[in-house]
Image: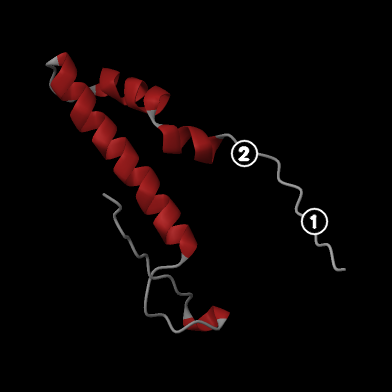
Amino acid sequence: MPRRFAIDIDEPFELGGGNAYANPQKYLLAALNACIIVGYAALCALQGITLEQKIHQIVLATSPNFYNITRAVRVMPELVIK
């Protein structure tokens, strides 16, 4: 069954936005934070351990969003006008 999601995005007044919603960068950082927190909770539960320094390295090693944000992908945008 398809699900519909909506993410309202805006920019602050200083950038010509209406300052009504978070900007894309805030959503990106929130996604990274959520991914890492889920990693902590899931890995601690699966390994039966109390959160401690060891789990931090496991979470960082298995977080897709941490990987995506900390390993830049070279993007070469091109504008073609015909």
Find numbered disc 2 in the image and state the secondary structure of the residue it sits on.
Answer: loop
What's the residue at 44%, 84% (across, down)? 18
Residue 75's spot in the image, x, y percent?
71, 46
Disc 1 is placed on an element classified as: loop
Disc 2 crowd rating (10 Å Cα; few below 14, some 14-19, many 20+) is few
How far from the left and from the top, in percent, is residue 47?
17, 15
Task: Tell me the number on the disc at residue 72.
Answer: 2
**Label 1: which residue?**
78
Three-letter amino acid code of the residue under disc 1? Glu
* Colouring method of the image: secondary structure
Q: Is residue 2 above or below residue 42?
A: below
x then y, percent, for residue 31: 37, 48
Which residue corresponds to the image point at 32% horizontal and 36% vertical from the top-left?
36
Mark 2 belongs to which amino acid? Ala
User: Residue visible at 18% across and 23% down?
Assistant: 44
Work out which residue is located at the far top of the displayed protein and give it.
47
Q: Earlier in the sequence, mark 2 or mark 1?
A: 2
Closest to the observer, 34 or 50: 34
Position of 78 compared to 24: left or right? Answer: right
